[in-house]
Image (cartoon, rainbow, N blue to C red):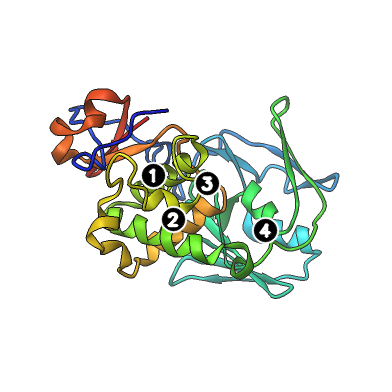
Amino acid sequence: MKRRLSALSLCLVIALTAALSLPLTASSAVSSNASDDAFASVTIDGEVFAAGQTRIIDDTTCVPFRAFVNAMTGGEAVVWWDGDEKIAYAEYEGAVISAAIGAHYITANGRYLWCGTETYLKDGTTYVAVRPLAEAFGAEVTWQSEGRRVIVSARGNMIESGDTYYDATDLFWLSRIISAEAQSEPLSGKLAVGAVIYNRIASDDYPDTVYGVIFDETGGVQFTPAATGTIYCDPTEESVIAAKLCMDGYICDERILFFCATSIAAVSWAGQNRTYLYTIEGHAFFA
């Protein structure tokens, strides 16, 4: 069994002068000036798709949104662009997909799917990571490094609605602990808090539910908001989004188990006993 935190050091951190960052924040923002140097070959159900128009950004294959949606639906989807909000939309079989310029995720039928790189605009075309976009249409994606080939299967059933996919109890508590701990942090910081919860669930040393991890008091209170009552406050919108991204399978780092404000690093148990990984804004994270 791993040693637990004491009540005094429930969040855990170390003050280090050089902070590392998560993969989310490490790469520079992708914009309309994204490089054209790297291309991928994409096929959909055996047919070549958008030859010369698919790009590899941050090791992620990106495809033209409208063209891909039309290819997946035989042109039957309704696709439109909101120039004010800079969001591309598509509607098919009652499911709405949205891809916002600058976002690292798309929404599909009320689900939040991680992209790995930003959705970006180039020459009037919206480019989106192919894997989550294919998932929205029930298609599978296979990557072949030789020849940089992306193979997309034929469309299946549209992705399950978020109304039925997300467990209401887990979403309630996960979004609230993320908000209580990191509402002033960037999305990367919120996702890291969510990852800590899920990494503890996966560990034999902690309870196996979201609620159980949050309110665990073995060895002392583990999360201050559970003791102070701030966990019962309504979560911020971005905290709910972060929770849904985690519940949809995006765990930014499977190593992190502890975190805390950098201001208490010097007295934290983790700072003296755990492996420091990186700092995100006001929180440091440990394995």
Say if mark 4 contacts mark 1, CB within 8 Å. no
Query: Which is nearer the N-term, disc 3 or disc 4?
Result: 4
Residue at (18, 39) in percent of width and height: 262
Give the residue at the far right of this rendering.
46
Residue at 28% x, 47% y: name it.
221
Q: Amino acid at mark 4?
A: Ala
Residue 95 higher or lower than 23, as above or below: below
In front: mark 4 or mark 2?
2
Residue that numbered label 3 is attached to: 250
Q: Please name whichever residue, 37 or 118, is drawn nearer the observer in this view of the structure.
A: 118
Q: Earlier in the sequence, mark 4 or mark 1?
A: 4
Q: Give the CA separation, mark 3 to mark 2.
A: 19 Å
In the drawing, does residue 256 fall left or right of residue 50? left
Q: Nearer the viewer, mark 3 or mark 2?
A: 2
Name the residue tied to disc 2. 211
Badge 3 or badge 2: first in the primary sequence: 2
N-terminal of the pair, mark 2 or mark 1, is 1
User: Marks 1 and 3, how far apart in space?
Assistant: 10 Å
Report crowding for label 1: few under 14, some 14 to 19, many 20 or more residues within 10 A (C-alpha): many
Q: Is residue 260 above or below residue 186?
A: above
Rendering coords of residue 75 (x, y %): 78, 67
The answer to whether the residue labelled 3 contacts the one labelled 4, judged by CB atoms less than 8 Å apart, is no
Q: Is residue 121 visible?
A: no
- Position of residue 156 measured from the top left corner of the image (x, y, whole percent): 80, 58
Q: Residues within 10 Å of mark 4 (few under 14, many from 20)?
A: many
Of marks 3 and 4, the one in the foreground: 3
18 up-or-down from 172: above or below: above
The residue carrying mark 1 is 192
